[in-house]
């Protein structure tokens, strides 16, 4: 019997991780996109390169950097140990952090691109009528680039859902805690359990297909 608790645990952990990361990604990606769209300041290219770096870095490098940043030897690592009374490494929180890092660039780029395509005359008209910058942003600019935002949300979610290498390094492979579907597939293949591996492969393919199908249907 394939569909037991041991099958569903990685699926649930993957969905919980991707959804939790998505909330953070939406907030950070939207704010970062707003700050960078149509703006010019010294160091903008350098900062934007850092934002987009996770899209081109090997997952092992991303995992290595997360270990360095949040490890017990770093200031951030020591600070988080005081706050959470334990290291963040090899915890479910580590899976969320990793998913956030790899998914953030897609949301950021989508929001920034969408905002750059908004007609500035419409925003100026709202300001002339007395609207402040945040009102213009939330009630004028964002609704006008809603399709870009939906695109960013779906791409960020599917990227977070499929993360493997960095999660494996930073969060580990702890069944029932940090073992996501991609890690479970790898583990099953190593153990020679191809039937279970195929079941997990199909589950993540179906979820990803449905998300991308919705994106293509909505944006066309």
Image (spheres, grey):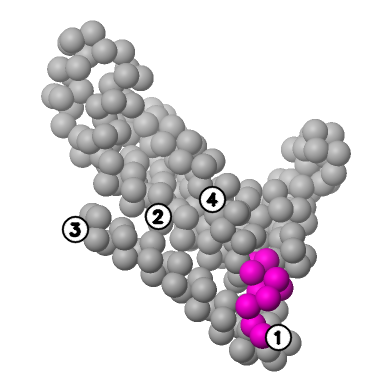
Residue 144 is drawn in which quadrant? top left
N-term mark: 4 or 3: 4
Q: CA distance from mark 2 to mark 3?
A: 15 Å
In the rendered structure, find residue 18 and report the number of the disc placed on it. Answer: none
Is disc 2 in contact with disc 3, using a CB cutoff of under 8 Å?
A: no
Which tag, 4 or 2, sits closer to the chain's start?
A: 4
Q: Earlier in the sequence, mark 2 or mark 3?
A: 2
Of the 4 image quadrants, the one containing the N terminus is: bottom right
Q: Which mark is residue 154?
A: 2
**Residue 167 placement (x, y as % from top left):** 65, 61
Evaluate if marks 1 and 4 touch, with contact meaning CB atoms under 8 Å apart: no
Name the front one of labels 1 and 2.
2
Residue under the image location 74 percent in, 63 percent down: 176
> Where residue 37 appears, x then y in whole percent?
32, 34
Would you call the spot at circle 4 few (<14 residues within 10 Å), some (14-19), or many (20 or more)? some
Report, in whole angstroms, how far the alpha carbon at label 4 lies from the one at label 3: 25 Å
The residue depicted at 86 percent of the width and 39 percent of the height is 85
Visible residue check, residue 44: no
Q: Give the residue number, with chain letter if any, for mark 1.
A: 190
Give the magenta-colored segment's residue range.
1-10
Label 1 vs 4, first from the N-terminus: 4
Left/right of residue 137 with respect to residue 31 in the rendered view: left
Question: Which circle's residue, 1 or 2, is located before the other in the chain?
Answer: 2
- Circle 3 residue: 220
Give the residue at mark 4. Answer: 19
155, above or below 60, in the image:
above
Q: Return the x and y of residue 201 as percentages of the image width and height.
A: 53, 78
């Amino acid at each position: 019997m394939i569909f037991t608790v041991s099958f569903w645990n990685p699926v649930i952990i993957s969905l919980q991780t991707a959804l939790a990361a998505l909330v953070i990604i939406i907030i950070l990606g939207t704010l970062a996109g707003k700050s960078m769209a149509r703006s010019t300041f010294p160091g903008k290219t350098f900062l934007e390169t850092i934002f987009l770096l996770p899209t081109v870095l090997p997952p092992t490098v991303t995992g290595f950097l997360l270990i360095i940043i949040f490890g017990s030897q770093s200031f951030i690592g020591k600070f988080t140990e005081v706050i959470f009374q334990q290291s963040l490494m090899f915890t479910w929180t580590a899976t969320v952090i990793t998913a956030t890092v790899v998914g953030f660039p897609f949301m950021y780029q989508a929001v920034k691109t969408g905002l750059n395509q908004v007609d500035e005359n419409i925003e100026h008209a709202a300001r002339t009528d007395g609207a402040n910058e945040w009102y213009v942003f939330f009630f004028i600019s964002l609704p006008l680039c809603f399709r870009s935002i939906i695109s960013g949300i779906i791409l960020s979610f599917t990227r977070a859902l499929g993360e493997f290498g960095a999660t494996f390094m930073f969060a580990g492979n702890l069944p029932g805690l940090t073992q996501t579907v991609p890690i479970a597939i790898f583990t099953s293949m190593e153990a020679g359990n191809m039937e279970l591996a195929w079941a997990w492969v199909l589950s993540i393919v179906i979820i990803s297909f449905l998300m991308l199908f919705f994106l293509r249907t909505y944006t066309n």
